[in-house]
Image (spheres, helix red, strand yellow):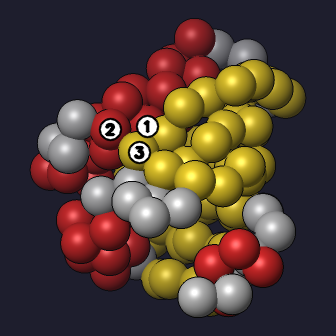
Amino acid sequence: MSNTTQNVAEQFIQYLNEEDFDNAEKCLDPEFKFIGVLGTREKASVYMKDMRQMKFKYQIIKTFIAGEDVSFWYMIDMGNKTIEASGWYQIINGKILSLKVLFDPRPLLNE
């Protein structure tokens, strides 16, 4: 594990929290893929378009590292709801290539 691996993932979260979406996107590989409970996104630009609109805030509770992968257990403030989630960041050559997020979607579906 290199410091860069963990730093890229943590820096990405910090940029999202600061709503610095241009720098957040620079942390992603252009071929980035998001896999979530409620859908997927292909390409960094498509994912970041969504993030610019949603403006989620993240509070990292625990970090797990294995090779070039970083996983966070975090609280995601979605504005009207806060959920517990886990995000698995696969990092290749200093860029986040994929993110898989798991959480219980029921609180979001009960609206």
Dot 3 lies on which element? strand
Estimate the spatial distance between the alpha carbons at disc 1 and disc 3, rounded to whole Å.
Answer: 8 Å
Estimate the spatial distance between the alpha carbons at disc 3 and disc 2, rounded to whole Å.
Answer: 5 Å
The residue carrying mark 1 is 13
Eyeballing the image, is 89 above or below 69? below
Marks 1, 3: nearer the viewer = 3
Residue drawn at the location 60% of the way across and 60% of the way down: 98
Instruction: Tell me which label, 3 or 2, sits earlier in the chain.
Output: 2
Q: Is residue 56 left or right of residue 111?
A: left
Q: Is residue 6 left or right of residue 16?
A: right
Question: Could you tell me if the residues under marks 1 and 3 are in contact, i.e. CB atoms within 8 Å?
Answer: no
Tell how many labels: 3
The C terminus lies in which quarter of the figure? Answer: bottom right
Q: What amino acid is labelled 2 in the image?
A: Asn
* Residue situated in front as seen by the camera: 42 or 16: 16
Q: What amino acid is labelled 3 in the image?
A: Lys
Q: What amino acid is labelled 1 in the image?
A: Ile
Residue drawn at the location 57% of the way across and 11% of the way down: 3
- Image x and y of residue 84, in percent: 72, 49
- Image x and y of residue 37, in percent: 73, 79
Q: Is residue 41 left or right of residue 29?
A: right
The residue carrying mark 3 is 57
Question: Could you tell me if the residues under marks 2 and 1 are in contact, i.e. CB atoms within 8 Å?
Answer: yes
Q: Is residue 60 left or right of residue 95?
A: right
Dot 1 lies on which element? helix
Eyeballing the image, is 53 above or below 71? below
The residue carrying mark 2 is 17
Q: Is residue 29 visible?
A: no
How would you rate the neighbour count of disc 3 (Cα within 10 Å): few for under 14, some for 14-19, many for 20 or more?
Answer: many
Residue drawn at the location 61% of the way across and 28% of the way down: 60
The N terminus lies in which quarter of the figure? Answer: top right
- Image x and y of residue 4, in percent: 51, 19
